[in-house]
Image (tube, rainbow, N blue to C red):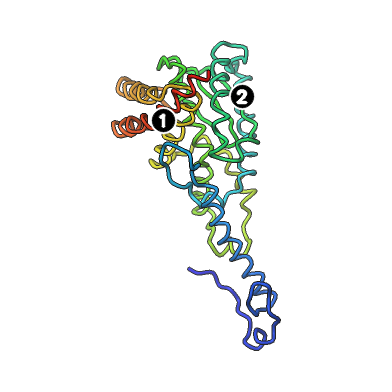
Amino acid sequence: MRPFLPQPSTADSDNAPLCHCGSRHTGAAHSLWQARRAFLMLGGVAAASAAAPAWTQVQVGEASRLRHLIPAQELEAAAEQQYAELIEQAKAKGVLVAASNAQSQRLQRIANALIPHTYAWNERAQQWRWAVALIRSDDVNAFCMPGGKIAFFTGIIDKLKLTDDEIAMIMGHEMAHALREHSREQLAKNSATSIGISLGAQLLGLGDMGNYAARLGGQLLSLRFSRNDESDADLVGLEIAARAGYNPNASVTLWQKMGNATGSSANGLAFLSTHPSGPERIRELQRNVPRVQALYQAARTQR
């Protein structure tokens, strides 16, 4: 249903002075015209800022414009709070692995190599307060929340016997979800359904999206991304890791290990409940490895 916009009377409109927008209308109508124009301009800006960098080797589409219904700053603040609570709970239970631990240092080293290559994918990433935590758990899981808050469970490293290259592929994939703002997009879709947000509300400047983003923070760890989001994260993560000097072929061996783990036992494989493995996923990665191979080789010569 189209939003109802009050119209000025013909007399008012005829007598109104010429507005800087090029039309004759009264103040109320002008405010609504400005709101409509701002919303449409936002769509254009969103399309430009969401496009993949021109120099990328992998081919991904634009990020969804719908994500702009959720303010990024508020969502990142909510994610930071939830991450802090997670870390505190891990400390209280004695399962937060110390930063001085060799595995923690390994993760931090890989993150430090990848992070500089994230900036081109999201200009906000340069201001993110990136963090990496290792939690002692048999669960096969890892994630990166909005704002660059990363966590790995020891189960994913130990059970799959991950190499540094394979860890980089997982980390790059999870970073890509944050960079491409898949959580923001999913929450926007959820919020549009659950609180009945309409285009009219956006045009008229209504709604409480900032506070709603904060309330949705608790959903961040339970979101399920679409197949397109997963493919997007696979390819963006692949390129980020290759540019950091990690072997892109590890993306294939990683998902082969994931597939074998699924076949042997489903216990503790939380990662696979939201990141399903399959032949097509592996084939797509195999098709894209040659695209980033030169990036990997160039990075290796500089390390």
Q: Picture coordinates of residue 244 (x, y %)?
A: 51, 25
- Residue positioned 63% across, 69% down in the render: 32
78 sits to left or right of 65: right
Task: Give the SS element for disc 1.
Answer: helix
In the picture, the disc for residue 292 is 1
Q: Is residue 228 left or right of residue 41?
A: left
Q: Residue 148, percent across and down?
A: 58, 32
User: Where is residue 103, by image quadrant?
Assistant: top right
Task: Name the residue carrying label 2.
Answer: 89
Residues 298 and 275: in front is 298
Give residue 196's position: percent from left, percent from top. Answer: 52, 58
Answer with left or right where residue 131 lies relative to residue 194. Answer: right
Residue lying at the far bottom of the rendered structure: 11
Residue in the image at 68% along x and 74% along y:
28
**Residue toward you, 285 or 268:** 285
- Indicate which disc residue 271 carries: none
- Residue 247 coordinates in the image, percent (x, y): 42, 22
Q: Is residue 48 above or below residue 270?
A: below
Relative vertical location of residue 138 with respect to residue 179 in this rendering, above or below: above
Q: Residue at x 60, y 15 (%)?
A: 94
Give the mark nearer the N terminus: 2 vs 1.
2
Label 2 secondary element = helix
- Residue 160's quadrant in the figure? top left
Q: Is residue 240 above or below residue 12?
A: above
**Mark 2–mark 1 distance (CA, rounded to whole Å):** 39 Å
Q: Residue at x 52, y 34 (%)?
A: 221
| Neighbour tally class for label 2: few under 14, some 14-19, many 20 plus, Cα within 10 Å | few
Q: Residues within 10 Å of mark 1 (few under 14, many from 20)?
A: many
Q: Is residue 48 above or below residue 100?
A: below
Q: Nearer the viewer, mark 2 or mark 1?
A: 1
